[in-house]
Image: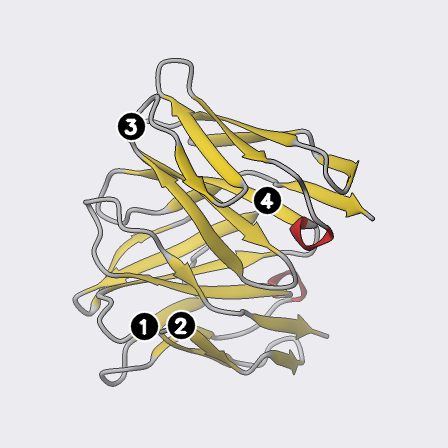
Amino acid sequence: EPEVTQTPSHQVTQMGQEVILRCVPISNHLYFYWYRQILGQKVEFLVSFYNNEISEKSEIFDDQFSVERPDGSNFTLKIRSTKLEDSAMYFCASSEFAGLSYEQYFGPGTRLTVT
Amino acid sequence: EDKVVQSPLSLVVHEGDTVTLNCSYEVTNFRSLLWYKQEKKAPTFLFMLTSSGIEKKSGRLSSILDKKELFSILNITATQTGDSAIYLCAVESKGSGDKLTFGTGTRLAVRP
Protein backbone atom coordinates (compact mmCIF):
# COMPACT_ATOMS: atom_id res chain seq x y z
CA GLU A 1 0.00 0.00 0.00
CA PRO A 2 1.43 3.40 -0.93
CA GLU A 3 2.59 5.51 1.98
CA VAL A 4 4.20 8.82 2.80
CA THR A 5 7.83 8.46 3.84
CA GLN A 6 10.00 10.88 5.78
CA THR A 7 13.71 11.15 6.47
CA PRO A 8 15.45 11.30 8.79
CA SER A 9 13.40 9.72 11.55
CA HIS A 10 15.33 11.71 14.15
CA GLN A 11 17.47 14.80 13.71
CA VAL A 12 19.50 16.45 16.44
CA THR A 13 20.85 19.90 15.73
CA GLN A 14 22.33 22.83 17.56
CA MET A 15 20.47 26.09 17.98
CA GLY A 16 21.06 28.41 15.04
CA GLN A 17 21.77 25.62 12.57
CA GLU A 18 19.76 25.02 9.42
CA VAL A 19 17.86 21.77 9.00
CA ILE A 20 16.07 20.23 6.06
CA LEU A 21 13.38 17.66 6.66
CA ARG A 22 12.48 15.48 3.71
CA CYS A 23 9.27 13.85 2.65
CA VAL A 24 8.23 11.68 -0.25
CA PRO A 25 4.45 12.00 -0.66
CA ILE A 26 2.28 9.30 -2.19
CA SER A 27 3.04 9.31 -5.88
CA ASN A 28 -0.29 10.39 -7.39
CA HIS A 29 -1.01 12.96 -4.70
CA LEU A 30 -1.03 16.62 -5.60
CA TYR A 31 -1.45 18.41 -2.28
CA PHE A 32 1.22 18.42 0.38
CA TYR A 33 1.25 19.57 3.98
CA TRP A 34 3.56 19.97 6.95
CA TYR A 35 2.32 19.73 10.52
CA ARG A 36 4.19 19.69 13.78
CA GLN A 37 3.48 18.27 17.21
CA ILE A 38 5.37 19.56 20.20
CA LEU A 39 5.66 16.84 22.85
CA GLY A 40 2.40 16.51 24.73
CA GLN A 41 0.59 19.08 22.60
CA LYS A 42 -1.78 19.14 19.63
CA VAL A 43 -0.85 18.47 16.05
CA GLU A 44 -0.58 21.94 14.46
CA PHE A 45 -0.84 22.93 10.83
CA LEU A 46 2.20 24.66 9.37
CA VAL A 47 1.75 24.93 5.61
CA SER A 48 -0.02 23.52 2.58
CA PHE A 49 1.49 23.38 -0.90
CA TYR A 50 0.04 22.83 -4.34
CA ASN A 51 1.28 23.40 -7.85
CA ASN A 52 4.68 24.52 -6.63
CA GLU A 53 3.42 27.22 -4.37
CA ILE A 54 2.20 27.71 -0.84
CA SER A 55 -1.61 27.56 -0.58
CA GLU A 56 -1.90 28.50 3.05
CA LYS A 57 0.40 28.91 6.02
CA SER A 58 -0.12 29.32 9.73
CA GLU A 59 1.28 31.95 12.07
CA ILE A 60 3.92 29.44 13.12
CA PHE A 61 5.30 29.33 9.59
CA ASP A 62 7.39 32.50 9.77
CA ASP A 63 10.35 33.63 7.68
CA GLN A 64 12.56 30.97 9.25
CA PHE A 65 10.58 28.28 7.46
CA SER A 66 10.43 27.44 3.79
CA VAL A 67 9.12 24.58 1.69
CA GLU A 68 10.19 23.28 -1.66
CA ARG A 69 9.47 20.53 -4.12
CA PRO A 70 12.90 20.28 -5.69
CA ASP A 71 12.02 17.40 -7.99
CA GLY A 72 9.04 15.26 -8.89
CA SER A 73 9.05 13.24 -5.71
CA ASN A 74 10.53 15.07 -2.72
CA PHE A 75 8.87 17.73 -0.58
CA THR A 76 11.13 19.48 1.91
CA LEU A 77 10.74 21.70 4.94
CA LYS A 78 13.70 23.94 5.75
CA ILE A 79 14.22 25.72 9.03
CA ARG A 80 16.89 28.33 8.51
CA SER A 81 18.08 29.04 12.02
CA THR A 82 16.65 26.59 14.52
CA LYS A 83 15.48 27.63 17.95
CA LEU A 84 14.96 25.48 21.03
CA GLU A 85 11.20 25.84 20.63
CA ASP A 86 11.38 24.25 17.17
CA SER A 87 11.94 20.89 18.88
CA ALA A 88 8.94 18.81 17.87
CA MET A 89 7.75 15.95 15.71
CA TYR A 90 7.26 17.16 12.15
CA PHE A 91 4.73 15.32 10.03
CA CYS A 92 4.39 15.50 6.30
CA ALA A 93 1.00 14.67 4.76
CA SER A 94 -0.38 14.42 1.27
CA SER A 95 -3.78 14.13 -0.34
CA GLU A 96 -4.90 13.22 -3.81
CA PHE A 97 -7.05 16.31 -4.21
CA ALA A 98 -8.30 19.12 -2.06
CA GLY A 99 -11.54 20.99 -2.14
CA LEU A 100 -13.53 17.79 -2.43
CA SER A 101 -12.77 16.29 0.96
CA TYR A 102 -9.98 13.89 0.21
CA GLU A 103 -8.28 12.51 3.29
CA GLN A 104 -4.74 13.48 4.16
CA TYR A 105 -2.29 10.65 4.74
CA PHE A 106 0.51 11.23 7.19
CA GLY A 107 4.12 10.11 7.15
CA PRO A 108 5.85 8.60 10.20
CA GLY A 109 7.34 11.93 11.21
CA THR A 110 10.78 13.37 11.89
CA ARG A 111 11.62 14.04 15.50
CA LEU A 112 13.66 17.25 15.58
CA THR A 113 15.65 17.96 18.73
CA VAL A 114 17.31 21.36 18.99
CA THR A 115 19.96 21.62 21.68
CA GLU B 1 -10.17 30.84 15.01
CA ASP B 2 -11.13 27.23 14.33
CA LYS B 3 -11.42 25.11 17.45
CA VAL B 4 -11.75 21.37 18.12
CA VAL B 5 -12.40 20.01 21.60
CA GLN B 6 -12.22 16.32 22.46
CA SER B 7 -13.43 14.52 25.52
CA PRO B 8 -12.56 12.74 27.62
CA LEU B 9 -8.86 13.55 27.64
CA SER B 10 -8.07 10.02 28.71
CA LEU B 11 -9.92 6.81 29.33
CA VAL B 12 -9.00 3.43 30.80
CA VAL B 13 -11.23 0.47 30.02
CA HIS B 14 -11.03 -3.32 30.09
CA GLU B 15 -11.02 -5.54 27.04
CA GLY B 16 -14.50 -6.11 25.75
CA ASP B 17 -15.85 -2.76 26.91
CA THR B 18 -17.48 -0.30 24.52
CA VAL B 19 -16.20 3.26 24.44
CA THR B 20 -17.52 6.50 23.02
CA LEU B 21 -15.16 9.34 22.22
CA ASN B 22 -16.48 12.85 21.68
CA CYS B 23 -15.44 15.69 19.44
CA SER B 24 -17.03 19.12 19.22
CA TYR B 25 -15.93 21.85 16.87
CA GLU B 26 -16.25 25.47 15.86
CA VAL B 27 -15.12 26.07 12.31
CA THR B 28 -15.78 29.00 10.04
CA ASN B 29 -16.07 27.08 6.77
CA PHE B 30 -16.59 23.45 7.61
CA ARG B 31 -15.77 20.89 4.95
CA SER B 32 -15.26 17.61 6.78
CA LEU B 33 -14.36 15.98 10.08
CA LEU B 34 -11.73 13.30 10.28
CA TRP B 35 -10.75 10.76 12.91
CA TYR B 36 -7.20 9.49 13.18
CA LYS B 37 -5.54 6.91 15.43
CA GLN B 38 -2.08 7.79 16.71
CA GLU B 39 -0.12 4.95 18.24
CA LYS B 40 3.57 5.62 18.23
CA LYS B 41 4.13 8.21 15.56
CA ALA B 42 2.03 9.07 12.54
CA PRO B 43 -1.71 9.61 12.76
CA THR B 44 -3.37 6.89 10.71
CA PHE B 45 -6.62 7.69 8.98
CA LEU B 46 -9.83 6.13 10.30
CA PHE B 47 -12.85 8.04 8.97
CA MET B 48 -13.87 11.12 7.08
CA LEU B 49 -17.35 12.50 7.72
CA THR B 50 -19.01 15.16 5.65
CA SER B 51 -22.75 14.58 6.05
CA SER B 52 -24.88 14.58 9.16
CA GLY B 53 -26.51 11.41 10.40
CA ILE B 54 -24.70 8.95 8.15
CA GLU B 55 -22.77 6.42 10.17
CA LYS B 56 -19.42 5.28 8.90
CA LYS B 57 -18.33 1.84 10.02
CA SER B 58 -15.14 -0.16 9.87
CA GLY B 59 -15.14 -3.38 11.85
CA ARG B 60 -15.64 -2.54 15.51
CA LEU B 61 -15.24 1.19 14.92
CA SER B 62 -18.01 3.51 13.87
CA SER B 63 -18.50 7.25 13.73
CA ILE B 64 -21.25 9.74 13.10
CA LEU B 65 -21.43 13.48 12.58
CA ASP B 66 -24.04 16.01 13.72
CA LYS B 67 -23.54 19.21 11.76
CA LYS B 68 -26.36 21.01 13.53
CA GLU B 69 -24.94 20.45 17.01
CA LEU B 70 -21.35 20.56 15.73
CA PHE B 71 -20.06 17.32 17.13
CA SER B 72 -19.02 13.83 16.24
CA ILE B 73 -18.61 10.60 18.17
CA LEU B 74 -16.31 7.66 17.61
CA ASN B 75 -17.51 4.34 19.01
CA ILE B 76 -15.35 1.31 19.56
CA THR B 77 -17.14 -1.90 20.54
CA ALA B 78 -15.57 -5.00 22.09
CA THR B 79 -12.32 -3.14 22.72
CA GLN B 80 -8.99 -4.95 22.44
CA THR B 81 -5.56 -4.06 23.82
CA GLY B 82 -4.54 -3.14 20.27
CA ASP B 83 -7.05 -0.30 20.37
CA SER B 84 -4.87 1.48 22.93
CA ALA B 85 -3.81 4.73 21.26
CA ILE B 86 -4.53 8.43 21.09
CA TYR B 87 -7.58 9.14 18.97
CA LEU B 88 -7.43 12.46 17.19
CA CYS B 89 -10.32 14.42 15.79
CA ALA B 90 -9.58 16.99 13.09
CA VAL B 91 -11.72 19.38 11.14
CA GLU B 92 -11.00 20.41 7.60
CA SER B 93 -11.97 23.93 6.63
CA LYS B 94 -12.70 25.18 3.15
CA GLY B 95 -10.20 27.51 1.67
CA SER B 96 -7.11 27.57 -0.41
CA GLY B 97 -5.14 25.37 1.92
CA ASP B 98 -7.64 22.84 3.24
CA LYS B 99 -5.76 22.68 6.50
CA LEU B 100 -6.69 20.36 9.33
CA THR B 101 -7.30 21.71 12.82
CA PHE B 102 -6.73 19.01 15.43
CA GLY B 103 -8.08 18.47 18.90
CA THR B 104 -5.81 17.44 21.75
CA GLY B 105 -6.87 13.83 21.39
CA THR B 106 -8.30 11.20 23.70
CA ARG B 107 -5.78 8.78 25.14
CA LEU B 108 -7.41 5.35 25.34
CA ALA B 109 -5.85 2.54 27.35
CA VAL B 110 -7.41 -0.91 27.09
CA ARG B 111 -6.37 -3.26 29.89
CA PRO B 112 -6.44 -7.05 29.44
Q: Residue furthest bottom?
A: A71
Alpha-carbon distance for marks 2 and 4?
20 Å
Is B5 in front, or is B110?
A: B110
Q: Which mark is residue A3?
A: 2
Q: How many marks?
A: 4
Q: Position of residue B78 (x, y in %)?
A: 66, 39
Q: In the rendered image, which residue does mark 1 sit on?
A: A26
Residue located 23% across and 41% down the image: B95
Residue located 76% across and 45% down the image: B110
Alpha-carbon distance for marks 3 and 4?
21 Å
Alpha-carbon distance for marks 1 and 2?
6 Å
Measured along the vertical axis of the image, is residue B36 above or below residue B5? Answer: below
Residue located 54% across and 69% down the image: A109
Q: Position of residue A14 (x, y in %)?
A: 67, 80
Alpha-carbon distance for marks 3 and 2?
27 Å
Chain to which the residue tagged by mark 3 belongs: B
Residue located 62% across and 67% down the image: A83
- Circle 1/circle 2 CB separation < 8 Å: yes
Query: Disc 1 vs disc 3: which is toward the camera?
Result: 3
Label 1: which secondary element: loop
Is B17 in front, or is B73?
A: B17
Q: Amino acid at mark 4?
A: Tyr
Q: Which mark is residue B51?
A: 3
Q: Quadrant of residue A63?
A: bottom left
Is B10 in front, or is B109?
A: B109
Mark closest to the chain's N terminus, 3 or 4 = 3
Instruction: Give the crowd class for mark 2: few <14, some 14-19, many >=20 residues within 10 Å.
Output: some
